[in-house]
């Protein structure tokens, strides 16, 4: 039996796991701060510049994943076994991300294999989010009444496509490494255009004509 309390526990558990994962990102830098007894701050920042960069990127990525997860679950009022297990796999990818983050931070390791593991984890996170939304779209009883029948996979698929493109580019052009993730900067403008197009379609109707009067 799936209850409202069970759904609240699912959301709270997800938030807690994401919070722990995002906190783990900073721990290696906290350890590095102990070296301030022997080196000055400028030297420490120069030495750990790669770690700082990867920390910022990973923090931003996990933060964006959480925001998307939060927006999605705001539209849900329940869950089923499929959503529960897919959400657990989504959390697994989130918790795993600090590992490739630390691999990349160690001496600026940006080998193809490390970049593949790093961006590949993000692709799995995005794909799992798409699967979660697809499950809910197939079960209207899990959707909030005000959004029932209006959910779309388009924003999630755009994010997945951008991450997959970044992964492919990073492997085809190894010298780019993490810079392939700058493709994600296009994600915001693309989603804005998509939302505007959706609003225009809702106003004009499917054939581009004004909707009939009530």
Image: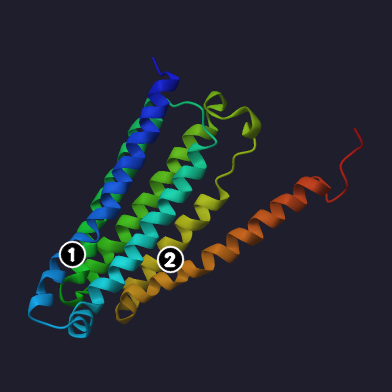
Give the Cα distance between marks 1 and 2: 33 Å
Tell me what residue is drawn at x 7 percent, y 80 percent: 38
Report which residue position mark 2 lands on. 165
Which sits in the foreground, 47 or 86?
47
* Residue 23 appears in the rendering: yes
How far from the left and from the top, in percent, is residue 6?
A: 38, 23
Disc 1 vs disc 2: Cβ atoms closer than 8 Å?
no
Sequence-first disc among 1 and 2: 1
Answer with left or right where residue 87 lies relative to residue 212: left
Mark 1: few/some/many CA within 10 Å (<14, 14-19, 20+): few
Q: Quadrant of the C terminus?
A: top right
Q: How is the image coloured?
A: rainbow
21 vs 119, nearest the viewer = 21
Q: Identify the residue at the far top of this view.
A: 1
Q: Nearer the viewer, mark 1 or mark 2?
A: 1
Q: In the picture, residue 16 is in which quadrant?
A: top left
Up/down of 5 relative to 17, above or below: above
Callout 1 secondary element: helix
Residue found 41% across the figure and 28% down from its top: 8
Q: In the shown orientation, is residue 185 left or right of residue 194? A: left
Q: Residue furthest right?
A: 213
Lateral position of residue 19 relative to residue 127, left or right: left
* Residue nearest the observer in this picture, 139 or 36: 36
Which numbered tag is attached to residue 30? 1
Q: Which residue does the image show at 16% across and 70% down from the upper left?
A: 33
Q: Vertical placement of 25 versus 56: above or below?
A: above
Label total for image: 2
Q: Single out the residue that lies furthest toward the left.
A: 38
| Residue 192: mark | none
172 lies left or right of 209: left
Where the N terminus falls, by quadrant? Answer: top left
- Measured from the top left, where is residue 176 in percent x and y? 34, 79
């Amino acid at each position: 039996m799936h209850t409202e309390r069970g759904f609240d526990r699912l959301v709270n558990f997800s938030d807690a796991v994401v919070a722990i994962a995002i906190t783990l990102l900073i721990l290696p830098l906290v350890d590095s701060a102990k070296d301030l007894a022997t080196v000055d701050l400028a030297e420490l920042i120069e030495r750990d510049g790669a770690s700082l960069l990867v920390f910022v990127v990973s923090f931003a990525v996990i933060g964006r994943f959480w925001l998307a997860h939060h927006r999605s679950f705001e539209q849900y009022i329940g869950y089923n076994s499929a959503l529960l297990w897919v959400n657990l796999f989504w959390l697994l990818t989130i918790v795993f991300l600090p590992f490739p983050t630390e691999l990349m931070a160690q001496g600026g390791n940006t080998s193809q294999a490390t970049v593949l593991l790093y961006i590949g984890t993000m692709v799995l996170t995005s794909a799992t989010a798409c699967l979660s939304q697809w499950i809910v779209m197939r079960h209207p009883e899990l959707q909030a009444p005000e959004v029932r029948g209006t959910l779309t996979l388009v924003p999630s698929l755009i994010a997945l496509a951008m991450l997959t493109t970044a992964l492919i580019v990073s492997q085809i052009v190894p010298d780019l490494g993490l810079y392939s993730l700058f493709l994600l900067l296009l994600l915001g403008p693309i989603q804005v255009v998509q939302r505007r197009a959706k609003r225009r379609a809702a106003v004009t109707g499917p054939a581009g004509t004004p909707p009939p009067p009530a």
